[in-house]
Image (spheres, helix red, strand yellow):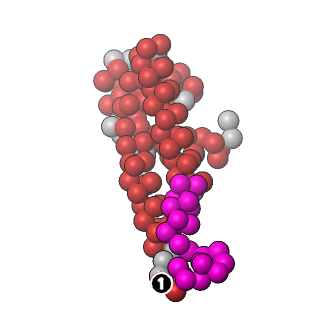
Amino acid sequence: MQKEIIKKISFYLYNYNNIDDLISERRTNIIDAIDVTNRAWLKSKISKGNTLEDQIIKLNNDSLILEYKRWQVFIKKVLAFLYKHSPITHKFLVLKYFKKFKDEDILKSLKIDSKALISIKSIY
């Protein structure tokens, strides 16, 4: 896989529990960036402006927020699949990315040798 894709997957795995916070922060940044004043509202009556409706549309159609939500759903589905079909891999992902264990702690927790850990890491 390309390095950019691997970085993106790792980012979303490490930040899976914080995705809602990232979405909230992005919404706040969008709201702060848009000037919703009486003058803007009056201007919007004549031409396109920053009305409350425009702000809501921008929040709902923001590509970064949509990307965060898609990744959140995707990771949830992958984890559910791995939980059923490959419990060791599921536990590895949980320990590495969510609980942020070091390799030594993962080896002890999973009760596997380093070769098996390298094998699991090569897949993910």
Instruction: In the rendered view, tell whether residue 34 sits above or below residue 111.
Output: below
Q: Where in the figure is residue 59, as x and y percent of width and height?
A: 52, 59
Residue that protrudes farthest toward the right in the picture:
2
Q: Secondary structure at mark 1?
A: helix
Tell me: 17 left or right of 13.
Answer: left
> Residue 14 appears in which quarter of the rendering?
top left
| Front position in the image: 6 or 72 | 72
| Front position in the image: 38 or 123 | 38
Task: Indicate whether residue 42 is drawn in magenta.
Answer: yes
Image quarter hosting the N terminus: top right
Amino acid at pointer 1: Asn
Residue that protrudes farthest toward the bottom in the picture:
39
Q: Residue at x 30, y 24 (%)?
A: 109
| Residue range highlighted in magenta | 40-61
Instruction: In the rendered view, tell whether residue 93 sits above or below residue 16.
Output: above
Q: Where in the figure is residue 39, as x and y percent of width and height?
A: 52, 86
Q: Residue at x 37, y 43 (%)?
A: 17
**Magenta span dominant secondary structure:** helix
Q: Residue at x 59, y 78 (%)?
A: 44
| Front position in the image: 92 or 115 | 92
The number of discs equals 1
Q: Is residue 104 shown to the viewer in this render?
A: no
Q: Residue at x 55, y 48 (%)?
A: 66
Task: Indicate whether residue 45 is drawn in magenta.
Answer: yes
Instruction: Read off the residue under disc 1.
Output: 38
Image quarter hosting the C terminus: top right
Q: Where in the figure is residue 116, as x and y percent of width and height?
A: 47, 18
